[in-house]
Amino acid sequence: MRRLVSLLTAAWLVAPGLAYPASARASAAAADGVVLTEITPESPDPAAPITISGVVSGTPQAPVYVRVRYGSGTPLRSRADMDAHATGQADFTNSYKTSIQGAQLDATGKFPFTLDLAPGQLRLTQPGVYALTIEVAHGLTEPPVAAARTFLTYIPAGTQLSKTRVAVALPMIGRQHQADDGVFMDEDLLGDGRLANVLKLAETVDSNVTWFVDPALLDDAQRLSQAHRDGNSGDRANRTADPNAGAWLNGVRTALADNPVIATPYGDPDVAALVHNGLDNATGQAVAQGSAVASQLLKRQIPATTVWPTGGLIDRDGLDELAVNGTRSVLLTGSALPPVNPLDAATAVPAAALDTVKGQVTAQLADPVLGQLLSTDTKAPGAALAARQRFLAETAMLSLSQPNRAASVIVAPTARMWNPDPAFVADLLKPLPWTRPITLDSVKPGRTPRGDLVYPPQARQAELSKAYMTTVRKLARKVETATKVPTSGAPVFETALLRLASASWRGQRAEKDAAAFITKVEQAVDARIALVSVARPDDPRSIAGENGRIPVTVTNGMREDVMIAIRVKSAQPALLAVEASQGAPEGVYESETVKVPQGKTQSFDVPVTVLGDGGQATLNVQLLTPDDRVYGKAAKLTVSATGYGGIALVIVGAAVVIMMAAVVMRILRRRSKKRPLLPTPVREHGEPQEA
């Protein structure tokens, strides 16, 4: 029930200001506040009353005086005036009326109120946007303790004005969940309800709205809708399909069927950080992969020729890199490309042509104020109404400021991973009597001279850190090496790297969370590289002699053929020297690159020389890619070598002994043949004779 019967006063004061200073009006006790909950109609009619409802809060039983401050027939002249009023930097309300006197806050410290005001009482005499402030004080002449500043948009029926062309761009972007493809470090895709709200909004808004969709998000939903793996489990256990993820993806396909859709580069990468840290190739990969994945999962051709850089900001290096990779337009915040003459800002077309190393690129400029209103957190009391009233006023001011030429404006939320209130945003974006919806690609470059791209130091500091990008770059080099060996040349771990370069990892806390993803991807890369390896025999290789060849066997455990070479060096060249191959440094053997079929082995014969008496030596065997990059870790092979010099001495020594023995025996035999015969012995006399 309206509580006005004994509270309304008939006293209207028209004055340049109240009896208390503006500084006092701007201050308020922390415990006091006023929230507006309803203003109807949104665009007043001369014959209908204006109803304003709200709630005053503060100390229980405290006295309440509610004042209405207004502009006394003088509409605001510009959007700059509107901003000054909204922020309290200027006062455009030179008249006021104390509408409620002597009320009292209840035991809970609340006082709801409703005011009925006629347009004539507020001096709404001509079409325009009017400043309105509802103030709360504790006495008739006391300074205000709280104030709610808002706007009244007065466009009576029959008012002639050009309709503002409104292009809307909305993001469907999420944080990263996968490490390697199909390996989820986090399966909570839909748990917080944010993506459900985005889908509900997509099902509601006008078909002219352009959606920027991150293909990595669609990829997450697709893979979660099937059996997938848990990256946090030691055995990478399989997880069952999530039907909610599949339902969400199907809903996205249906909701976006009639809307313009643009694929962001895969993973929504931090393009500025990539360029500033020497990972230029990743941008082109992300753009190409983005279009391919989005087209596959949305089941229609999705272009990626427009890029919405993180924060709506990009520098010249980043813009050139995008242009080289096929970008034809970028969506930036309006402050990224200001007009040369600030006075042109109010009427300038929100698009301009920029020269790049690959020709011109169109910069489309989103309105910062309307973007903030679109991103309003409607859970805050009174926030939805305040944003709604200002959105009406801002768009009306655009039409009023250019009565003979339709103005254009681009509306996009300031936060990419926003959690919209679907009902609020859909209502905000409905056509108004002074607006007309258009598609984003309808906004063409204007002729207003503009300065160069603005990329402030804060934007550079917000990029993914140098330390983080150094880690990603090292991993990227390892991944690149892994692609050099298979004969197919098919990219591997490309999408995993792009996810690691996502702008969603910005900030120290996010980068710390990304460390687990990096570790998991690196483990997968190492495991793939290890599929091609040097076979290590259980027993040491043996070589007897001064020269010989040591067999080195390479095993291919991949499911495709590989091209591989080896480089061999001795760890003890004083015992076992490797004979250099043609063109290789001394003591280094490098083989020709050969093909090893899938699941097969290939043997290489490495020529070596045993020095001295030999002994046990180690050969370091390094696999090489066809372009001479080190592939994997070096293998160590143990060789047991016995030199020819020692064997020869033993053999010669034995031969000499045998030969000397033979000579001695021969001499002895010769001497025995030349010695005379002994005489026959004579019997002694007297001995008996045999008869």
Image: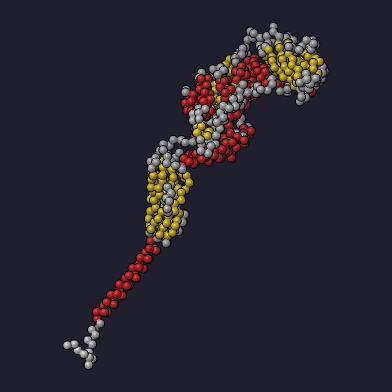
Q: Is residue 337 in sight in this rendering? A: no
Residue 290 in picture, x, y percent from top left: 50, 29
Quarter-of-image position of residue 137: top right
Between residue 280 and residue 50, name the one nearer to us.
50
Outermost bottom residue: 686
Who's the residue at 62% across and 26% down the image?
Answer: 335
Q: Is residue 402 left or right of residue 115?
A: left
Residue 154 x, y percent position in the rendering: 68, 12
Q: Is residue 321 above or below residue 572?
A: above
Residue 302 in the image: x percent, y percent? Answer: 49, 24
- Closer to us: 410 or 579: 579
Q: Is residue 632 visible?
A: yes
Residue drawn at the location 35% of the way across and 65% of the way down:
651
- The quadrant in which the N terminus is found is top right
In this rendering, the count of numbered labels is: 0
Tell whether 669 sits left or right of 636.
left
Quadrant of res 198? top right
Name the residue at 24% across, 85% down: 678
Q: Is 8 left, or right, of 522 in this rendering?
A: right
